[in-house]
Image (cartoon, rainbow, N blue to C red):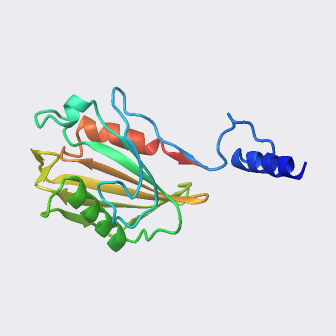
Amino acid sequence: MKARGLALMMLLGGCGGGGAMPDAAPLHGYSLPQRPGGFTFHTQLPPAFSRFLPLSGEEETREPPEADFYDPSSASFFSYLFIWWLTDTPDLSTTALRADLDLYYTDLCPSQTVAVTLADPEPAAADAEALVARRGGTLDAQTCLGNPVPIAAVETSTYDCPDHAAVIVLVSPQPPSSQVWTDLLAVRDGFTCW
């Protein structure tokens, strides 16, 4: 009887305890819209390609259709966003974010000539729920994923969510007035966490 009680406690603990239903929504999480016609990539942090990135948690991307993402003549070339859904207490200062993005792209591209800039944060509006700050900057990788890449604008948004910090990074070499940036900003603005 004692072994059965322990097994039942372990089973309940593995399912969230307290009789939680398997289909119940997680206690803490986030929602981020998909890009129409695009695709998503999901990995653990640090990712396999950048083992020394000092972040833990998960990463998920929102990318345009694959043919457009890799086609230098497409308006959606190298234009995407990703979220870092972070555990622990990450350093989200401008200096740390710049260093994290520099290491991430040096390993992803791979390129020893990566240069990332980030400006000081813009404070969040008083009515912004979890948003802490936004920073604008640039990414100069010169080549990435086998293609020459023009200097891209980068925007980071940091969020203070229950039990997690979140960073959403938007990247595109297109001008700010382009449809690509309108689409990326719409996905970013659809982010919620609980």
Quadrant hosting residue 179: top left
Instruction: Tell me if 14 is positioned left or right of 147 in this view.
Output: right
Q: Residue at x 26, y 37 (%)?
A: 180
Q: Residue at x 67, y 48 (%)?
A: 27
Q: Nearer the viewer, residue 153 or 102?
A: 102
Q: Is residue 17 visible?
A: no
Q: Residue at x 18, y 47 (%)?
A: 173
Residue at the top extreme, as displayed: 37
Instruction: Tell me if 77 is positioned left or right of 123 in this view.
Output: left
Residue 103 vertical placement versus 108 (above, below): below
Q: Is residue 69 visible?
A: yes
Q: Nearer the viewer, residue 170 or 101?
A: 101
The image shows residue 129 at horizontal and vertical percentages of 56, 54
Instruction: Tell me if 184 is positioned left or right of 124 in this view.
Output: left
Residue 35 vertical placement versus 46 (above, below): above
Q: Residue at x 12, y 45 (%)?
A: 146
The image shows residue 87 at horizontal and vertical percentages of 52, 61
The image shows residue 151 at horizontal and vertical percentages of 14, 53
The image shows residue 176 at horizontal and vertical percentages of 24, 46
Q: Nearer the viewer, residue 77 or 20?
A: 20
